[in-house]
Amino acid sequence: MSNGRCTECGRHGIPILYGLPATHARVLAAAGLLRLGGCVVTDDDPNWVCPSCAHMWSDPEGALRELYLLFGRARHAMPRSS
Ligand SMILES: [Zn+2]
């Protein structure tokens, strides 16, 4: 567990989202709130990247929780489509 903090410098990290990004994810990535990791997933991919020192580390549970919060917030901020 890293609590979303960089294990090198202690700054709050950015969660990395793997898989095909939905519109929400693209918007959040453009805002610098998450990093898109691409579609090819292996077992030891890092889940966090530090915006300060670029260190990457693995904490899948923490990253999922962070992404869940980000998407919850984004849903409120996004204009309704359809
Ligand atoms: Zn760092």
Image (cartoon, rainbow, N blue to C red):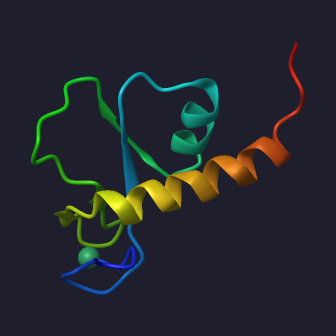
The quadrant in which the C terminus is found is top right
Residue 73 appears in which quarter of the rendering?
bottom right
Residue 13 seen in the current view: yes
Residue 37 screen position, x and y as percent: 30, 37
Instruction: Residue at 20%, 53% (x, y): give it.
Output: 46
Residue 70 screen position, x and y as percent: 62, 54
In the picture provided, is 23 more to the left or to the right than 29? right
In the picture provided, is 11 more to the left or to the right than 56? right
Instruction: Residue at 10%, 48% (x, y): give it.
Output: 44
Residue 43 screen position, x and y as percent: 11, 42
Residue 78 screen position, x and y as percent: 82, 38
Q: Residue furthest bottom?
A: 10
The quadrant in which the N terminus is found is bottom left
Please determine whether, in this image, residue 65 is positioned above or below residue 17: below
Instruction: Residue at 71%, 51% (x, y): give it.
Output: 72
Q: How many numbered marks appear?
A: 0
Residue 14 seen in the current view: no
Ligand number 1: quarter of image: bottom left
Frontmost residue, 62 versus 20: 62
Q: Residue furthest top?
A: 82
In the picture provided, is 64 more to the left or to the right than 78? left
Please determine whether, in this image, residue 23 is positioned above or below residue 11: above
Instruction: Residue at 62%, 25% (x, y): give it.
Output: 23
Q: Residue furthest front?
A: 61
Please determine whether, in this image, residue 82 is positioned above or below residue 33: above
